[in-house]
Image: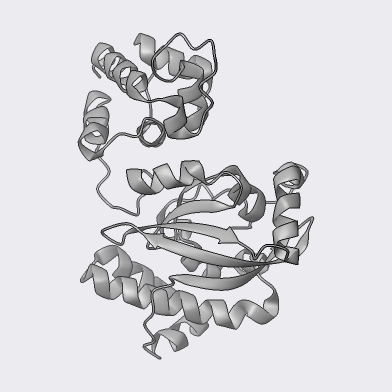
Amino acid sequence: MNLPELAAFLKSRRARIRPADVGLPTGPRRRVPGLRREEVAQLAGLSADYYTELERGNGAQPSAQTLAALARALRLNGDERDHLFHLAERPIPQAAHSPTAHVQPALLGLLDRLTTTPAQIITDLHETLAQNEPAVALLGRPPTTRGPAASFVYRWFTDPASRALYPAEDHPHHSRAFVADLRAVAARRGRDPEVAKMVSSLRRRSEEFSDLWDVHDVALRRGDHKRIVHGSLGVIELDCYCLFSEDGRQRLLWFTAPPGSQGAAQLELLLVIGTQDLAANDGPDIRQR
C-alpha cells in the first residue's frame, strides 16, 4: 500500500472542494481553500482522528467500504475513484449495484442540495447508496447486509418485517410495482448474471413473486404516491419522484407533499424530530424505502 501517495492524493482532492459544493457554510475564518479534515470525515462517516491518520500516511488500512465513502465525500470521478483503490491496493468495484458502488457525481450533487426533504440514491436493484438525514429519519438506515438481501426488493419478498414501512392494504400495489420494475431492469441489463440469480432465488422463495413475474408486467418505477408508516408521526402520505442516472443504473428518489397538506406538515415535524425515535428503538431498523 502506497501510504505517502494515498495521503497526498487525499489532501489534493480535499483542497479542491469548496464547502458550498457539499452544502457546508463557508464561514469567515476558513484558512484552507477546500474542506477541513473533520468535514471530510463527517461526510464520509468516519472519525476525524481516523481520517487524519490517512492523510498523514501513518499506517491506517482503509477497507473497500471506507474508500467508497471517501470517493463519495470527495466527489471523485470514475478514474479518480479507481486510482484511490489502486493506491490502497484494494480491488476496484465493478458492479454498479455493489456495496462499494461509485455514486454518480451528478446525483450526489443534487442530493447534497436536498436538505429539507427526504432523499436518497439507490441502484436499479434498490440498494441504498446514499441518504440525507431526513431520509434516515423517514426510512431508517440501510442494512449492512451484502448480497441479494441488500436489495429492498429482495427483502420485500423474503423478509416480512421489511413490509412494515407501508400499510398492509398497500402491499399488493407495491409488490406489483416492484416486480414490474425488476423485469424492466432485467431487460435493460440483458443477460446479467446478478439479476438472473436474484430472480431465480425470488421465484424459489416467494410464491407471490413467482406469480407476479409470470404476469410479465413491465414498468420502471418513475414515481408513485406512497403512504409511509412512521413510528412517531403515524401514516405519512407523500409523493415519491425518481431521477435516473444517464446509464439508468442509479436513481435519486425524493419525497414531498403538496403545500398545506397533512403530509407537508408531517414532513416539517420530521425535520424537528430527526432520528431521535430511531435511537430510542432497541429493535432492528427495518424501515427502508
Q: Give the left or right position of residue 7, taking residue 206 as reference.
A: left
x then y, percent, for residue 203: 42, 79
The quadrant in which residue 8 appears is: top left
From the viewer's perspective, is residue 275 above or below residue 24?
Answer: below
x then y, percent, for residue 222: 43, 70
From the viewer's perspective, is residue 82 above or below residue 184?
Answer: above
The quadrant in which residue 274 appears is: top right
Q: Give the left or right position of residue 179, taking residue 197 as reference.
A: right
Depth check, front residue: 69 or 26: 26
Residue 157 visible in this rendered orientation of the protein = no
The quadrant in which residue 236 appears is: bottom right
Depth check, front residue: 171 or 239: 239
x 32%, y 59%: residue: 249
From the viewer's perspective, is residue 94 above or below residue 67?
Answer: below
x then y, percent, for residue 148: 42, 60
Residue 134 visible in this rendered orientation of the protein = yes
x 27%, y 43%: residue: 93
x 26%, y 37%: residue: 77
Q: Give the left or right position of residue 183, taking residue 210 as reference.
A: left
Q: Quadrant of the C terminus?
A: bottom right
